[in-house]
Structure formats: C-alpha cells, structure tokens
Image (cartoon, coloured by chain):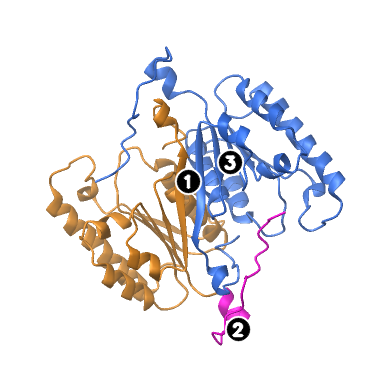
Chain colours: A blue, B orange
Amino acid sequence: MHMPQGKPSVVPEDGLTTRQRRTRPLVMVHTGPGKGKSTAAFGTALRAWNQGWAVGVFQFVKSAKWKVGEERALRVLGDSGEGGTVVWHKMGEGWSWIQRPGAEEDHAADAREGWEQIKRDLAAGTYRLYVLDEFTYPIKWGWIDVDDVVATLAGRPGSQHVVITGRDAHPDLLAAADLVTEMTKVKHPMDAGQKGQRGIEW
Amino acid sequence: MHMPQGKPSVVPEDGLTTRQRRTRPLVMVHTGPGKGKSTAAFGTALRAWNQGWAVGVFQFVKSAKWKVGEERALRVLGDSGEGGTVVWHKMGEGWSWIQRPGAEEDHAADAREGWEQIKRDLAAGTYRLYVLDEFTYPIKWGWIDVDDVVATLAGRPGSQHVVITGRDAHPDLLAAADLVTEMTKVKHPMDAGQKGQRGIEW
C-alpha cells in the first residue's frame, strides 16, 4: 500500500541536521485550474492554528460570497483562545476588482500596497504562517514584481511559512517554492450546468 | 482574466429549475498523488460549518499525528455554537493499519463496519456533509464493494453532500462523482530530503 510515511526519499548533503531540516520554513504554492487551491491553504491554516501559531491571511481577490465560511471559521478559531491567532486581511474595498472591472490602475496600486504590508510583516516576523490567497494573479498581471517576491521570500527571517494560491503561478515563483501542488480539474459540476451553491462553493 | 464566476458553461436540459440545480447534492472526489486532498476536504467542511450544517467526518486511516489540527479545529468549531455541528469518527483502534501492517483481515472488517455506519447515516439523513477521508483505499483493496458505494450514493435521500479523499480512486467512483479534482505533485520538499514537520504535515 502506498501510504505517505513522512520519510524523505533522499537525504540531502546540505549540512543541515534533521532537526534543522524539520523546522525549515517552507514556501508552498497551490496552483492549477482545479478546485481546492484556497481550500487546502485554509486547511493548512487549521494545522498552524492547532500549533498555536499566528496566522495571517491576505486575500488578493475580494468577493461578497467567496470564502466567507473559511473566514468566519478561522476568526472563531482565532478568538477561541484554544490555538493560535488569526488576522484576516482583505486589502480594503479597492480589492473588489472582479466586481468593478475596468479600474485596473487602482487595483494594481492596492495589490502593491498589500504586498508592501506583507514585506513589512515578513521583516518583523509578525506571523508564523502566511496565506497569500490568489496572490498569483497580481504577479501574472505585472502589478507585483516576481523578482521582488522571490528575493523577499528567500531573505525572510526566522521560521515563517508561506502558502500562495492561484492559477497560472509564475515560473520563477514555482522555482522558488519548496512545495508545489497543481490542482487539476477532472470533472466539475459546472460543466454539467450545476450552479455554484452555498456551503460548497462559498 | 480567468476568474471563476460561478456561471455554468452549459445549461443542461434536465428539467430542473435553477433553484433545484443549485441545491443538488454533490459527490466530490479529491484524488491524485499530490498534497491537499484531505486538507481541501476539511476546508470544505469549514464552509459547511459556516452554513450551520451537520458535518460528519469518517477517517479511514488512523495515525497518531495526522490531521490532529483539522480534528481539533473542527471540534472547537462544532462546539462553539456559532455554526453547524461536527462529529468526528475515527473508526476505533482497529483502524491503525499503518502502524500495524500484517493484520489485514481485521482492518477489512473495520472498514466494512465504518461503511455500514455511513450507509445507516445516509439513510437517516444524519449529516448534510460527509467527509470520507482516505475512503478510496478500502475500495481499492477490495474491502468495500465499489458497486455498493456507487448505488448507495446514487440512492441517498435528501440533500447530503459527500466528499471522498484518497489516491487511486476507483474508476466507477470517479464516474459516479459530480466533481473530481486531481491533486498533482509538482514539487515536494520530501524529494529534497525535507522532513515532514509540525504545523504543515500535521
């Protein structure tokens, strides 16, 4: 049976001890056209919360109904005192670019401001886990410089993990990531005329 | 820009109203060799919880450290009174087949007993969302009859959603599913000798 056992398939000659390797901070990217990219990132946040970690969510796409479930659940968890803290950043009203197409220049500025805040938080070690939800898009659209992202992630201090979600992740971002998972759509109910629905899609 | 808009790509001639189509219960399968299958399922459970739904988790693989974060988070949420309820089934001590390989016959019986309980719950409408975690394996190993699974899912009453996770999902299960997402491993830190670590892997 092929069950993951947590065993590395090779032992690297990087001079790190097992303990160092076990606590090495990771950059994780969830990309691809399938479902589950963000959902899995928020699932990862549950594990971080359980460890008592400070979790920061930066949502780079705003929608009235998307991810309200995840947001409310993580807020309740963060406020419960049973685990870590959760701060959920929505990037302000300027982030509703889906609902107001055509005002691209403001959205680019908002995206850059969001990224500048992330850089400040990374420098300060504000969170132990960062969820940069839909962050691939402002990179793809040229609003945020991928070289700056890669350099910032490479130079971040301490043990800060970063999960980035979204389709069409930039190749340089993929190259810089420790873990990349591609979600592939094999079959989707919307292909058969199924409407998105409460409790499933949001 | 390719952002999901919740719009179906075709309108089916199935005689259903939009409202009926919007509330049609779904069978969702997360499969493939990549990470995020279970994590995304538990992320979906956050949405269900937020809707006030009763959530039932059936964990078909038991491990001392896996998914403790998700379990604790969902228990805290279920007990918070802010959303739906959560019941987490671990299938008893007999389910630790990873840690005690070689006693396969008991595990097969345990798997079948777990499935029989799911059938009873589906018939009774106990939950609104079922997470059948790692349920593909007992089907793959022949412990649970896939025809029985497909027929039971097809005949389940009411509006009960089912998410099934695990590698190597049976083709008949995929055919019966409304939504299939395959998680593909593009790059994994264990390939580079990275150890599994607290807060990320469990």
Q: Is residue A83 above or below residue A33?
A: above
Q: Percent x, y for residue B167?
A: 35, 51
Picture quadrant where residue B138 is located? bottom left
| Distance Cα–Cα, label 1 vs label 2 | 37 Å
The residue marked by circle 2 belongs to what chain? B
Q: Is residue B96 left or right of residue B192?
A: left
Q: Nearer the viewer, residue A92 or A111?
A: A111
Which residue is disc 1 drawn over? B73
Q: Secondary structure at mark 1?
A: helix
Q: Percent x, y for residue A44?
A: 50, 41
Magenta part of the protein: which range? Answer: B1-22
Q: Indicate whether residue B20 is drawn in magenta.
A: yes
Q: Quadrant of the C terminus of chain A?
A: bottom right
Q: Is residue A31 visible?
A: yes
Q: Is residue B189 left or right of residue B7?
A: left
Earlier residue among tags 1 and 2: 2
Q: Is residue A34 above or below residue A44?
A: below
Does the residue at mark 1 contact the one at mark 2 (Cβ under 8 Å)?
no
Q: Is residue B79 visible?
A: no
Q: Indicate whether residue A94 is drawn in magenta.
A: no
Q: Is residue A51 left or right of residue A102?
A: left
Q: Is residue A92 left or right of residue B176?
A: right
